Image (spheres, rainbow, N blue to C red):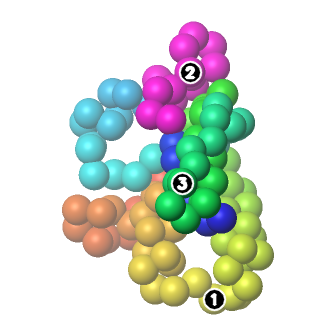
């Protein structure tokens, strides 16, 4: 089993910390933002032809990562990617996406930035 479906709705109220980046997303829609989330399974879809079970992940809590925490969060993401893929060096396209997500490159210009909060 490798697929997971993501329930589209974010949690309501205090569990939705993503709302703090709403204005930034509107102002710079192509700039990546980093979120951390806690998920559970709201149900399972079964393909009766193949017998495959696909969990439906539900976001229970989501928070925007603070600029000062981006470097630490990037290290956690890299470690998880390396463990999952078994590869110490990320493929170039993944490396670029990770770099963009953590604010080191402006996605519009390709220029280096310093949005790490340090």
Q: Which residue is mark 2?
A: 11
Residue 82 occupies which quadrant of the picture? bottom right
Residue 46, compared with residue 27, is above or below; it is below
Q: Nearer the viewer, residue 60 or 81?
A: 60
Q: Earlier in the sequence, mark 1 or mark 3?
A: 3
Bin the neighbour count of mark 1 within 10 Å (Cα to Cα): few under 14, some 14-19, many 20 and up.
few
Q: Residue furthest top?
A: 13
- Element at badge 3? loop
The numbered mark at residue 89 is 1
- Element at badge 2? loop
Which residue: 67% across, 80% down? 85
Residue 115 is at least partly visible in this image: yes
Residue 100, compared with residue 21, is above or below; it is below
Question: Residue 66's x, y, as percent?
Answer: 60, 39
Q: Which residue is mark 3?
A: 48
Queried whether the magenta region covers residue 13, the answer comes back as yes
Give the extent of the magenta segment.
7-20
């Amino acid at each position: 089993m490798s697929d997971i479906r993501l329930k589209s709705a974010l949690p309501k109220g205090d569990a939705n910390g993503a709302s703090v980046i709403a204005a930034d997303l509107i102002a710079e829609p192509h700039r990546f933002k980093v979120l951390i989330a806690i998920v559970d399974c709201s149900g399972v879809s079964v393909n009766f032809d193949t017998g495959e079970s696909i969990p439906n992940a539900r976001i229970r809590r989501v928070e925007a990562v603070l600029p000062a925490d981006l470097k630490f969060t990037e290290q956690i993401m890299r470690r998880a990617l390396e463990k999952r893929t078994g590869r110490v060096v990320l493929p170039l396209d993944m490396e670029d996406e990770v770099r963009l997500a953590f604010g080191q490159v402006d996605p519009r210009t390709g220029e280096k930035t310093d949005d790490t909060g340090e």
